[in-house]
Amino acid sequence: MVFAAFLHRHYREVMARRLESSACRDAVPRGGSTESILLQALFTMMGKIAKADGRVIQAEIDYVNTVMSRMGLDDHRRKLAIEYFNTGKLRSCDLSPLYPRLLKALGTDKRLALALLRVLCLLAQVKGVVNVPEQALLRQFADAVKIPRRELEQLGAELLARESQPGFVSLRADYALLNVVPGDDEQCIKKSYLRLLHRYHPDKLGPAGNSGEMESAARKMQAIRQAYERICAARK
């Protein structure tokens, strides 16, 4: 019994670190029933949030895949996570039976609870605006894992503030720069990217272009390339 409690605690600690930082590569230990309910609750809720506005876009699916990788899920657990996500998309899906089990599995581990909530907040922001249905689901989850509303509000404010920092470029800004949206497929995005490269290539200015115009065109080209590279990296 003591050994099982240790395994569950170790799993929670490792999972919290992995969800908090993409740089964490700690080996994922066995999590037993804690792992089972965490996977079911998290990915079912992700499906619920993604479908809250009636449609699931590719960028949301890409983010879910990113979370799977960050959690170190093997093929079997990835399959389970996808099944839970698809279940969450159903209108008939009721999350309330999962919450008591999740709360019991988390125990007093507030760090993991906050890491899970942060994952859900980031998913809700993928489309650019967190609408009323998503807000309600986030509040529901926070209440279920005993995270005060003020902490949920602080977390949301921190994530929004991060996007307004001078050195931070959000994927939404990258999509906007390429004149595409997250729901567009790779072919559409690449076509728009190549069209913009052609439009802003310094050679288009011809011999009459002055040095200022050439520099401006070069900066625009660089921004377009960097935006495209970030979008491609996020979709892998």
Image: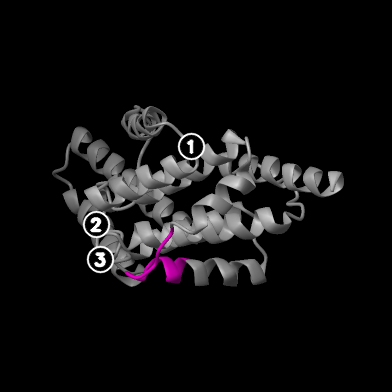
Tell me residue 107's x, y (percent). 63, 40
Residue 201 seen in render: no
Residue position marked by numbered label 3 in the rendering: 54
Measured in 3D between alpha carbons, the distance from the residue under mark 1 to the one under mark 2, in whole angstroms, is 48 Å
Circle 1 crowding by C-alpha within 10 Å: few under 14, some 14–19, many from 20: some
Tell me residue 197's x, y (percent). 28, 56
Which labelled disc corresponds to residue 214? none
The residues colored magenta run 85-95
Q: Helix, strand or loop at disc 1? A: loop
Measured in 3D between alpha carbons, the distance from the residue under mark 3 to the one under mark 1, in whole angstroms, is 28 Å
Camera-nearest residue between 222 and 156: 156
213 sits to left or right of 62:
left
Contact, CB < 8 Å: mark 1 with mark 2? Answer: no
Residue position marked by numbered label 2 in the rendering: 196
The quadrant in which residue 33 appears is bottom right
Q: Point out the tag, 1 or 2, that comes first from the N-terminus.
A: 1
Q: Helix, strand or loop at disc 2? A: helix
Circle 3 crowding by C-alpha within 10 Å: few under 14, some 14–19, many from 20: few
Q: Residue furthest left?
A: 208
Q: Point out the tag, 3 or 2, that comes first from the N-terminus.
A: 3
107 sits to left or right of 131:
right
Camera-nearest residue between 188 and 60: 60
Tell me residue 40's x, y (percent). 55, 61
Q: Amino acid at mark 2?
A: Leu
